[in-house]
Every structure is written in C-alpha cells, then in structure tokens.
Amino acid sequence: MRGGEDRSWSDPEGMTMENEILLTAIFVGSGLLAYVIIPGLLVMWDRVLDHMEQNGSGGGKEQGK
C-alpha cells in the first residue's frame, strides 16, 4: 500500500471526516423527520378522520341525523 491511498482506517484524520459526514447525515435526516414526515403523517391522518366523518362511519356519532 502506497502512502495516502487508504487513510480512512489507519489515520485518525480520515475517521474525523467520516464522522462529520455521518453527523451531517443524521442531522439532515432528523430535520426531514421532524419537519416533513411527521407533519405529513398528521395531515394525512386528519384527512382520513374527516373522510370517515363525511361518510357517516365516524366513531361515536349517530347516523341519520
């Protein structure tokens, strides 16, 4: 192995770069989860409940009134 070819496992400096990439990926993934996926699921669930109420199959409501 020539010098500088595979520094990611032998050199601590290479591991720092891998850790930075991993931390960035975790940060971006948690941001997507918090601001895109969870609110989207809440909106979809709200629409499902609204649809169930419109069709008369909502829980606890009397049908025919």
Image (cartoon, grey):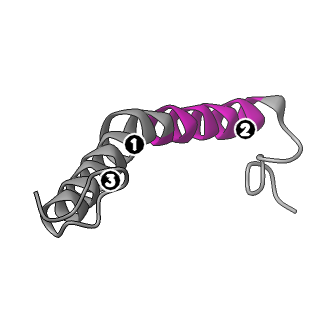
Q: Nearer the viewer, residue 29 or 34?
A: 34
Sequence-earlier tag: 1 or 2: 2
Q: Is 17 situated left or right of 32 in this image?
A: right
What numbered label is drawn on residue 45? Answer: 3
Q: Quadrant of the C terminus?
A: bottom left
Sequence-earlier tag: 3 or 1: 1
Identified at 20% across, 66% down, the residue is: 56
Q: Quadrant of the N terminus?
A: bottom right
Main secondary structure type of the part rendered in magenta: helix
Q: Identify the amino acid type marked 2.
A: Gly
**Which is closer to the viewer, label 1 or label 2?**
1
Q: Which residues are magenta?
A: 13-29
Residue that carries the numbered disc 1 in the rendered image: 38
Q: In this rendering, is residue 6 above or below 14?
A: below
Q: Identify the amino acid type marked 1.
A: Ile
What numbered label is drawn on residue 14? Answer: 2
SS of the residue under disc 2: helix
Residue 50, percent from left and from top: 18, 54
Identified at 27% across, 51% down, the residue is: 61
**Which is closer to the viewer, label 3 or label 1?**
3
Dot 2, how many residues are within 10 Å of its Cα: few (below 14), some (14-19), or many (20+)? few
SS of the residue under disc 1: helix
Whether residue 48 is in magenta: the answer is: no
Identified at 68% across, 34% down, the residue is: 19
Q: Nearer the viewer, residue 37 or 5?
A: 37
- Mark 3 vs 1: CB contact within 8 A: no
Mark 3–mark 1 distance (CA, rounded to whole Å): 11 Å
Q: Nearer the viewer, residue 64 or 44?
A: 64
Q: Identify the amino acid type marked 3.
A: Trp
Residue 17, percent from left and from top: 64, 35
